[in-house]
Image: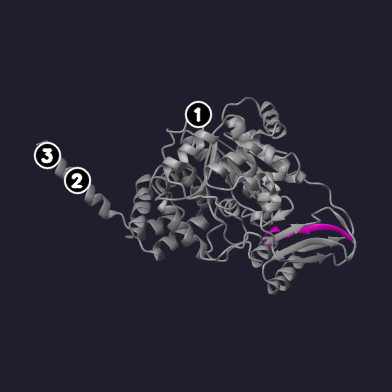
């Protein structure tokens, strides 16, 4: 009888699944309805299995773009995306594991600074990072500018490096979140990338699948970020924090400025060299400020004390030299030449350099960070498509930034490339991204807000 009952239950389940139609779900969302958990999980599962075609999912993404999603819908969809492939089990790694995710920007090399700082303070950083595309750089590309550096470790190697050195940064591999890969590719060509709930699903789906105990989100805002307005960045941070907490992960977010490139270096080996300078106790003030804020919040989420106590620990990790030693240990463990950490002059230099001069006297009042990132990509530092080949030595060194006084003819940036014909279009793009005004602007904070469960602090 139990067998017969089970057969009837399976038959009923099959009938239930056949009654779900993507057409009906699209219509429901288009009209402002709320999708049920069953409908969402069915939709993601069927899309991954290629049962639902791209044209119907495109319609759903556009309906979500205009109608939005409730917190419940967003959480369920995130969980469905996270479980659409492999879920990483980090239990072989001893101690608390904390992750950081940035929504992207220009000159954003913070992972290379904060991961060694956090590891030096006794908290494990087991991080999977992506490659750059378009105007935003990728941590994996930057790391691979160190000769011999491997970012394609298998899980056993990954766990071993973290246990031995306290940190490891690798590329995303295996069958993690296949739903997100398909959805992101579709969003990219249907003008639905900048949807707050869809960004939250994409980011947190990957973070939940990665298996860390705590998650810090760096939500960038400004001309070089996906979220151009601070209010939208805060809304995104609230959604992602709620998703993380609902999944049992201690989660917080910082809203950081990306209206101006972070630091002075844009380009892969250029950014690695600048990150090492910060770990030595120097480097640009804005980069150091943002990195200390991120590192102290990661330590706070890992239970290392109050934010003030964690800030002191992060600073001490730099001052003692332990953070730099952790970076060198990770580089060596992943097959890289650690001599480059101690002597950045070893990095290959681009054969050609072109200077950009100020077109007038005054103060730099605005830098279009996205356009500057594109100019760097045009020099060979980024990729226009996933198949583009990156020149690790190409990029831009900023000599003047927003708020700085300039004289006509003064050098405001240096461009680096391996082919001279790349300079003119990149130079034109850079010059168009700079606005020079008569008056200096008031200084703006680099960390604009902090979001925790049920709490938003605006600075």
Q: Pointer 2 and pointer 1: residues touching (CB < 8 Å)?
A: no
Measured in 3D between alpha carbons, the distance from the residue under mark 1 to the one under mark 3, in whole angstroms, is 46 Å
Q: Tell me what residue is drawn at x 54 percent, y 34 percent.
A: 124
Residue for badge 3:
3
* Residue 370: in magenta span: yes
In the image, is 438 to the left or to the right of 18? right
In the image, is 120 to the left or to the right of 286? left
Residue for badge 2:
10
Instruction: Indicate the position of residue 317 as horizontal and vertical percent values.
Output: 67, 32
Labels in figure, total: 3
Residue at the far left in the pictured view: 1
Q: Which mark is residue 215?
A: none
**Which stretch appears magenta?**
362-371
Return the disc, 2 or 1, that comes first in the chain's sequence: 2
Q: Tell me what residue is drawn at x 44 percent, y 62 percent.
A: 58
Return the disc, 3 or 2, that comes first in the chain's sequence: 3
Residue neighbourhood size for the residue with mark 2, other residues' Cα within 10 Å, grouped as few (<14), some (14–19), many (≥20) = few
Residue for badge 1:
95
The quadrant where residue 425 appears: bottom right
């Amino acid at each position: 009888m139990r067998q017969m009952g089970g057969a009837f239950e399976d038959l009923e389940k099959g009938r239930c699944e056949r009654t779900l139609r993507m057409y009906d779900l699209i219509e429901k969302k288009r009209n402002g309805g709320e999708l049920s958990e069953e409908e969402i999980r069915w939709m993601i599962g069927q899309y991954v299995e290629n049962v639902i075609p791209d044209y119907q999912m495109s319609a759903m993404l556009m309906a979500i773009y205009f109608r939005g999603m409730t917190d419940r819908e967003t959480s369920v969809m995130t969980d469905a995306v996270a479980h659409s492939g492999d879920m990483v089990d980090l239990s072989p790694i001893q101690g608390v594991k904390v992750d950081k995710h940035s929504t992207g920007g220009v000159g954003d090399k913070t992972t290379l600074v904060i991961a060694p700082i956090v590891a030096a303070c006794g908290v494990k950083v087991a991080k999977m990072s992506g490659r750059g595309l378009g105007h935003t750089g990728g941590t994996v590309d930057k790391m691979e500018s160190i000769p011999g550096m491997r970012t394609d470790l298998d899980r056993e190697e990954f766990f071993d490096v973290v246990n031995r050195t306290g940190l490891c940064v690798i590329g995303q591999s295996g069958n993690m979140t296949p739903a997100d890969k398909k959805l992101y590719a579709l969003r990219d060509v249907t003008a639905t990338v900048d949807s707050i709930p869809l960004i939250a699903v994409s980011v947190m789906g990957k973070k939940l699948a990665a298996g860390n105990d705590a998650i810090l989100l760096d939500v960038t805002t400004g001309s070089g970020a996906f979220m151009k307005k601070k209010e939208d960045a805060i809304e995104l941070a609230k959604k992602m924090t709620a998703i993380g907490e609902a999944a049992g992960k201690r989660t917080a977010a910082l809203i950081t400025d990306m209206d101006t490139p972070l630091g002075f270096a844009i380009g892969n080996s250029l950014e690695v060299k600048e990150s090492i300078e910060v770990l030595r106790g120097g480097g640009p003030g804005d980069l150091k400020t943002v990195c200390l804020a991120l590192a102290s919040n990661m330590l706070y989420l890992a239970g290392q004390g109050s934010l003030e106590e964690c800030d002191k620990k992060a600073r001490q990790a730099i001052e003692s030299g332990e953070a730099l030693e952790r970076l060198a240990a990770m580089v060596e463990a992943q097959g890289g030449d650690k001599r480059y950490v101690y002597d950045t002059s070893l990095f290959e230099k681009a054969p050609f350099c072109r200077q950009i001069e100020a077109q007038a006297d005054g103060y730099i009042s605005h830098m279009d960070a996205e356009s500057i990132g594109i100019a760097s990509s045009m020099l060979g530092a980024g990729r226009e498509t996933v198949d583009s080949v990156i020149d690790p030595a190409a990029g831009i060194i900023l000599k003047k930034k927003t708020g700085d006084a300039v004289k006509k003819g003064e050098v405001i940036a240096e461009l680096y490339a391996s082919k001279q014909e790349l300079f003119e279009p990149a130079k034109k793009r850079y010059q168009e991204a700079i606005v020079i005004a008569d008056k200096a602007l008031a200084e703006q904070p680099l960390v604009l807000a902090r979001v925790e469960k049920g709490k938003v602090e605006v600075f």
